[in-house]
């Protein structure tokens, strides 16, 4: 049983790492602010859930797991709020969505 | 309309309950009773209360979330959507051609309660590939990463699902 939990935790942590990497890669590859935010939100959701889930499996049935669960809940509640604030600020600053060419990389080459 | 005195009393009661809840939460999570940490805790509780008051949190009771079976079912559906669209956005990011087709769609949330509008907007933003950028007169502007994502958002009737939450 500990072996299975260990393995499962390992899988969760690795997958979470992959999603965090994809989020970072996407933030670099996307052409403008709004599309970058889409990529980064993969880190906020899948990355956070999988990594905290993996750590929870390591902690077992302890108070630490409950605290991790609450941290996860707060992350899932606050990250959209932060995204909304960022998007609203960008909109107010005059960055219109869709004014940048949608596929700039193909035109460059 | 309640007379002003009764209204103020009801507000004071809500603030007190809120403070007690906050203090309990702090003590429960910290579990330490040194004077410094208790003082920091008291400061945090008061600061939170002040910010909440500034946001008109205590003006009426609309902020109470009810954990009905419908709400749990909604969370399950949202989790499924988040998983599906995370994989979709990941696929787009890893595609060498970067096949994005960003666009803005409008979701009508005018019939919804303000709290439900917030739930709707946050649900949309939480889902990768869709981002609520503005709410004006009940219309939520949603930035979508791809044409397919925009279509599935419109066809998912997320607004109707959130409206069903209030009915219980």
Image (spheres, grey):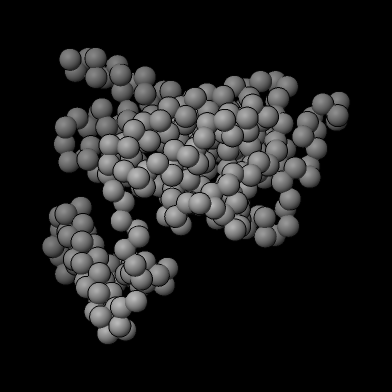
- The image position of residue A89, as x and y in percent, is 62, 58
Describe residue B16's horizontal placement relative to residue A17 as left or right. Answer: left
Task: Name which quarter of the figure residue B50 lies in.
Answer: bottom left
Q: Is residue B34 above or below residue B168?
A: below
Task: Say whether residue A47 is visible.
Answer: no
- The image position of residue A58, as x and y in percent, is 25, 28
Task: Name which quarter of the figure residue B42 lies in.
Answer: bottom left
Quadrant of the frame with the N terminus of chain B: bottom left
- The image position of residue B153, as x and y in percent, is 57, 33
Query: Residue visible at 47% across and 29% down?
Result: B81
- The image position of residue B110, as x and y in percent, is 54, 53
Task: Say whether residue B121 is visible.
Answer: yes
Observer-nearest of A106 and B57: B57
Query: Residue visible at 56% across and 24% down?
Result: B88
Q: Is residue B83 above or below residue A100?
A: above
Quadrant of the frame with the C terminus of chain B: top left
């Amino acid at each position: 049983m500990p072996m299975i939990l260990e393995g499962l935790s390992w899988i969760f942590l690795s997958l979470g790492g992959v999603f965090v990497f994809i989020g970072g890669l996407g933030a670099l590859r996307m052409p403008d602010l709004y599309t970058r935010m889409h990529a980064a939100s993969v880190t906020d959701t899948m990355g956070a859930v999988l990594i905290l889930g993996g750590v929870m499996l390591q902690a077992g049935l302890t108070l630490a797991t409950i605290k991790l669960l609450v941290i996860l809940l707060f992350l899932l509640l606050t990250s959209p709020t932060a995204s909304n604030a960022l998007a609203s600020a960008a909109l107010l600053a005059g960055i219109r969505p869709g004014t940048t060419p949608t596929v700039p990389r193909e035109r460059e080459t | 309309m309640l007379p002003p005195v009764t209204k103020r009393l009801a507000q004071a009661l809500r603030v007190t309950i809120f403070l007690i809840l906050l203090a309990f939460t702090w003590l429960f999570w910290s579990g330490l009773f040194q004077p410094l940490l208790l003082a920091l805790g008291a400061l945090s509780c008061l600061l939170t209360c002040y910010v909440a008051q500034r946001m008109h949190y205590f003006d009426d009771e609309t902020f109470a979330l009810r954990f009905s079976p419908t709400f749990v079912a909604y969370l399950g559906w949202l989790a499924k959507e988040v998983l599906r669209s995370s994989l979709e956005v990941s696929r787009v990011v890893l595609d060498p051609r970067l096949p994005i087709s960003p666009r803005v769609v409008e979701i009508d949330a005018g019939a919804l309660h303000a709290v439900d509008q917030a739930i709707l907007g946050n649900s949309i933003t939480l889902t990768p590939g869709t981002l609520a950028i503005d709410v004006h007169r009940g219309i939520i502007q949603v930035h979508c990463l791809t044409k397919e994502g925009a279509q599935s958002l419109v066809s998912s009737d997320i607004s109707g699902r959130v409206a069903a939450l209030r009915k219980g």
